């Protein structure tokens, strides 16, 4: 089977995991996910490109792979399969969709206990500790910021969640958002509100638009993002490359 070095074409790192909602997993599991994605991507791209090559081209390309001549392989692809980067991007997009759709299953493989911040959220909201509910909240939704950004529809997918619990979490998140907004200087709040119509609109605006404003840097942007309004939607989940992940790997 033809293999390609997709690592040289697209970078898979913590930024990608953050995009997939998996950045807060334990380091060992995060590394395993990235390595599995690399392997899957190379396999898929290789099979797709192989269908476009003659046997002579396959043999020629394999000589670069066998000799670990990465630069030679990339030059050969650029000359013989000029759209190979588009192929890599297409396969990567499909893989990202699969991983995102299966993030609950992936979290379930990785998590044995909920992060302390989720445990604390449960205690603060309900006045008592519930380790199983805290773990389910983390596995199905994510960290505290993601719990607060999630829609009620998403939160209701958590085992043990009901309308009363969801309402209490929503109210806690609103109080938390107000507290976080107070961390921003009044001049920054006024500037963001004037530019985007409201502080909540600013919280979901494009990074480039926010960073273009005077006095807004990465730190302020990170503060602002924690105020983001609900945006996630529940999605169907199908068996995919995530099945290759195992806590015993």
Image (tube, rainbow, N blue to C red):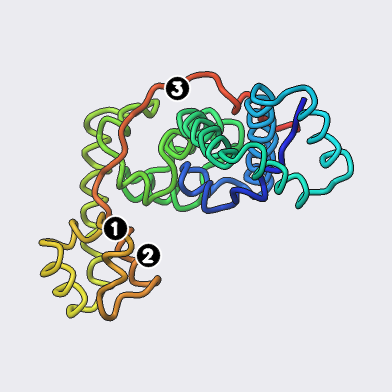
**Nearer the observer, disc 1 or disc 2?**
1
Residue at position x 57%, y 45% in the image: 25
Q: Residue 116, percent across and down?
A: 50, 51
What crowding class fits label 2: few (fewer than 14 Cα within 10 Å), some (14-19), or many (20 or more)? Answer: few
Q: Is residue 156 left or right of residue 244?
A: left
| C-alpha distance separating marks 1 and 2 | 12 Å
Q: Is residue 216 left or right of residue 76?
A: left
Q: Residue 159, percent across and down?
A: 40, 25
Q: Residue 122 falls in which quadrant of the image?
A: top left
Q: Quadrant of the N terminus?
A: top right
Look at the numbered discs 2 and 3 and tell me whether their residues touch, using CB distance below 8 Å.
no
Residue at position x 80%, y 26% in the image: 56
Tell me the residue that label 3 is attached to: 237
**First-in-chain label (3 vs 1):** 1
**Can the viewer see residue 132?**
no
Report the front residue among 17 and 146: 17
Residue at position x 16%, y 74% in the image: 191
Q: Is residue 148 above or below residue 216?
A: above
Q: Is residue 142 above or below residue 153?
A: below
| C-alpha distance separating marks 2 and 3 | 30 Å
- Quick one: SS at disc 3? loop
Tell me the residue that label 2 is attached to: 222
Report the front residue among 190 and 141: 190
Q: Quadrant of the C terminus?
A: top right
What crowding class fits label 3: few (fewer than 14 Cα within 10 Å), some (14-19), or many (20 or more)? Answer: some
Q: Residue 102, percent across and down?
A: 50, 28
Report the front residue among 157 and 211: 211
What crowding class fits label 1: few (fewer than 14 Cα within 10 Å), some (14-19), or many (20 or more)? Answer: few
Tell me the residue that label 1 is attached to: 206
**Nearer the observer, disc 3 or disc 1?**
1
């Amino acid at each position: 089977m033809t293999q390609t070095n997709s690592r040289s074409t697209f970078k898979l790192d913590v930024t990608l995991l953050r995009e997939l909602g998996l950045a807060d997993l334990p380091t060992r599991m995060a590394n395993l996910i990235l390595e599995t994605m690399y392997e899957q991507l190379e396999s898929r791209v290789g099979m797709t490109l192989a269908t476009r090559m003659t046997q002579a081209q396959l043999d020629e390309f394999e000589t670069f792979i066998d000799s670990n001549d990465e630069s030679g392989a990339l030059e050969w692809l650029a000359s013989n399969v000029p759209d190979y980067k588009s192929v890599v991007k297409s396969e990567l997009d499909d893989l990202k969709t699969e991983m995102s759709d299966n993030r609950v299953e992936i979290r379930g493989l990785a998590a044995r206990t909920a992060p302390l911040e989720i445990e604390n959220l449960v205690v603060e909201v309900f006045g008592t500790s519930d380790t199983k509910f805290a773990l389910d909240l983390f596995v199905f939704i994510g960290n505290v910021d993601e719990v607060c950004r999630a829609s009620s529809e998403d939160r209701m997918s958590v085992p043990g969640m009901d309308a009363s619990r969801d309402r209490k979490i929503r109210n806690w998140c609103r109080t938390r958002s107000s507290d976080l907004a107070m961390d921003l200087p009044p001049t920054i709040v006024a500037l963001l509100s004037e530019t985007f119509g409201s502080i909540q609109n600013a919280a979901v605006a494009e990074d480039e638009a926010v960073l273009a404003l005077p006095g807004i840097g990465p730190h302020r942007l990170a503060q602002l993002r924690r105020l983001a309004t609900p945006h996630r939607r529940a999605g169907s989940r199908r068996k995919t490359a995530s099945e290759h992940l195992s806590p015993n790997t």
